[in-house]
Image (spheres, helix red, strand yellow):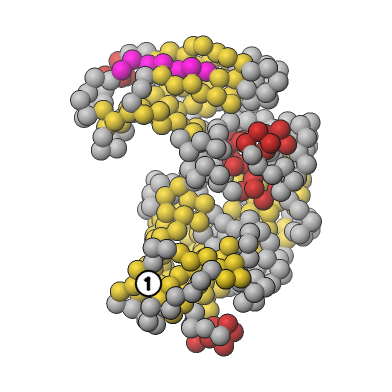
Amino acid sequence: MKLTKIFTTMIFVAALVVMAGFAYGATVRVNWNANSESDLGGYKVYYGTRSGTYANVLDVGNTTGADISSLANGYTYYFAVTAYDVSGNESAFSNEASILIPGDAVNDPDDPIAPDPSLPDSDMDGIPDYYEDLWGFDSVNPLDSLMDDDGDGVVNLVEYMAGTSPVDPNHYPYADNVLKDVIGEVGEVIDFSSVNPDGRYSIVPLTDAFPAPAGNSITPQATGAYLYNVLDEDSALVYRVRVSVTEQLTVIGDYEPGSFMELADQMFGIKIDLPANALIRIVPIGIGNVIPEAISAVETGDDALLFDILPFGLVLTEPAVITVDYDKPNPTVQRYDATDDTWVKVGDATAADGKVSFSTDELGTFKVVSGEQDDAPAGGGGGGGGGCFIQTAGF
């Protein structure tokens, strides 16, 4: 399929509807001329507040129109359309159309959504109470901002900041410049210069469970995920920083969107494969806190291989495949659920030739054990965890 005819025609932006009283309540209808290729699979609408750079994408299927909702007042939005065939091959962008959403905001091209600090936000998670109630979230639980309620691989906070729906899996951002991940070791200085190079922002713990930074850094004394808001001079959210801390990192690398990543710990035989479309941003990936079977048998009473894949709680758009060396009989895999403080069985694990493989769409702490085991309490901590601070590293 050549996918060319769509680009010889115009796309049209019309039927602007502004819903009064909604901070991000504008809806824009986008229409385009149909592609006539026989193996057409559908269309995607790309849009954002910078011409030629689209932070959001919506797969609309085989239709020639779409309503784009939750657009911020006072911003100019730019739209382009692509076509894709039944094999998933995608065309280049169509011509671009734009429209100004009426309102009082000032259009900053580097800030697709301008958070309004005057809106009540009881849990200080960056999502105002109104929207948490609207979407069925918990307005007094800041940790739900890092959950992925619609399962599209993008957490709720990032979707809110991008103006996409956190409860619609077909409506998600094309990029993410909100959530920042840092990984490190217990006792190591974690420097925030990458998100606060001039020291002009305030770095505020998301809850009282996390230590306040000293200057522009922290020195964590326990494993877990440490969460911070980076605020500007108007107390508006700029970034959410998640610091994932393990006892000892054995290997580390950077994932880049569009590129397959393989990261392997040769000493303990642990490998993670991330597909090219697993994430929409650059993220550091690490393996750490590896406790081999011989040691874990003393500490936990079972023949388990324990290890961390960082960042804790990182949600993936496409699942990663993890392979570990493990030759005990009848192996099963469990992932630590920090929310419930339990070990949860990973259902698709396979074993062959002394290796165990499984897929996961969330990183964290894993345990490979010999024999069937039901989901069970972790008994005081499971190493790290996604979105929740774990006070100790003991098992």
Q: Can residue 287 be seen at all in this image of the molecule?
A: no
Which residue is drawn at the image coordinates 56% and 44% (left, top)? 149
- Name the side, left or right, on which 52 lies relative to 299: left
Where is the N terminus found, in terms of image quarters?
A: top left
Q: Could you tell me residue 339's position as x and y percent?
A: 63, 59
> Which stretch is magenta?
28-34
> Number of marks in the image?
1
Place residue 18 in its image quadrant.
top right
Q: Nearer the viewer, residue 222 or 327?
A: 327
Where is the C terminus found, in terms of image quarters?
A: bottom right
Which residue is drawn at the image coordinates 56% and 19% (left, top)? 27
Q: Could you tell me residue 358's position as x and y percent?
A: 39, 64
**Magenta stretch: dominant secondary structure:** strand
Mark 1 residue type:
Val
Which residue is drawn at the image coordinates 24% and 19% (left, top)? 36
Residue 339 vs 99, above or below: the answer is below
60 in magenta: no
Q: Nearer the viewer, residue 230 or 16?
A: 16
- Name the side, left or right, on which 230 lies relative to 31: right
Q: Residue tagged by mark 1? A: 356
Q: Could you tell me residue 161's position as x and y percent?
A: 62, 35
Q: Can residue 77 be seen at all in this image of the molecule?
A: yes
Q: Nearer the viewer, residue 148 or 180?
A: 148
Which residue is drawn at the image coordinates 76% and 53% (left, top)? 207
Residue 141 vs 67, above or below: the answer is below
Q: Could you tell me residue 41's position as x and y percent?
A: 29, 30
Mark 1 crowd level (few <14, some 14–19, many ≥20, 10 Å Cα) = many
> What is the secondary structure assignment of the residue under circle 1?
strand
